[in-house]
Amino acid sequence: MSGGGGGDRGSGGLSVSVDKESGVGVLTLDRPSKLNAIDLDMAAELAAAWREFRFDDSVRALVVTGAGTRAFCTGIDRDVVVSQPNSPYMVDDPLVAIGPKANDLWKPVIAAVNGIACGGAFYLLGEAEFIVADEGATFFDPHTTYGMVSAYESIYMAQRMPFGEVARMALMGTAERMSARRAYEVGLVSELASPGGALAAAVECAAVIASYPVEAVQGTVRALWLAKEAARAQALAHAPQLVSMGNLPGERQAGLFAARRSGFRLR
């Protein structure tokens, strides 16, 4: 994003651009060769960026997107190895703090989805105010296919879609993908954009919101999240134990990944 006295910053896998004239910031997951999968460095950069924007009064609305056309984000980079304590009561989740709400940012965030959004991408989509998607975008949750519990992801999606749609996505795994059209029909996506147009459409919405009085906007964002925060917090509190007890050991997960089939049904 350029113009208006904007600036760019970022390193590693995250690019951050600010247009100070419009008050809109854009965070881009910038690992297109890895389908914008999140490694530990990018996870830390995301958390730091959201915290920094808490204190940047020149930025009044934000957009999060992925670089390239193939994917918004495919979740955690499988090459990342995370050691886990040998206890069902302690789980180290590298993605648990990558979203704006997890970092106490209550400025409006719009997600612009291009290509694939799956698995750990839902940590970001689940903490955005709304989602704009290219017509060719697809959504799915691969966890159960590979012997992993979809806990955080399903909890986030259960607050954005009808229960049956979330259950189908989580339980069908990689065998099925939800089209952008279907995601729009069930309420996950608020606007469909022409191919390649999601980012521009999201930035346009963000610029409108950023032009309104800051106190009114941020108060509204906070009120919206208060409406469901108790149920969300209670559910998330149980997620670590469900993951710890239900996930297969790493070597068995690796075997399922190696044996995966490439076909899927698009609905």
Image: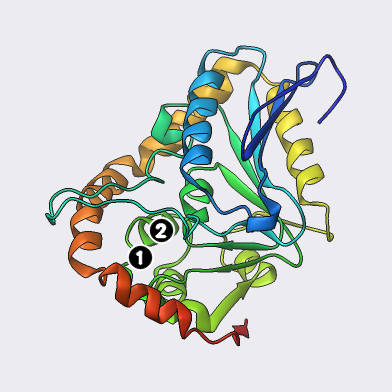
Q: Which residue is mark 1?
A: 150
- Per the model, the C-alpha gap separating discs 1 and 2 is 6 Å
Residue lying at 59% horizontally and 36% vertically, measured from the top left = 109
Q: Which mark is residue 69?
A: none
Residue farthest to the right? 3
Along the line of sight, which residue is nearer the eye, 9 or 136? 9
Quarter of the image with the N terminus is top right
Left or right for 114, reference 157 = right
Residue 103 visible here: yes
Left or right for 14, reference 93 = right
Image quarter of residue 150: bottom left
Q: Secondary structure at mark 2?
A: helix
Establish if 251 lies above or below 71. Answer: below
In the rendered image, residue 60, in percent from the top left (x then y), is placed at 64, 21
Residue 171 visible here: no
Establish if 27 lies above or below 69. Answer: above
In the rendered image, residue 133, in percent from the top left (x then y), is placed at 70, 56
Residue lying at 53% horizontally and 19% vertically, measured from the top left = 52
Quarter of the image with the C terminus is bottom right
Q: Which residue is mark 2?
A: 153
Residue lying at 76% horizontally and 37% vertically, measured from the top left = 203
Circles 1, 2 touching at the beta carbon (< 8 Å):
yes
Question: As shown in the figure, which amino acid type bears the numbered disc 1?
Answer: Ser
Question: As shown in the figure, which amino acid type bears the numbered disc 2?
Answer: Glu
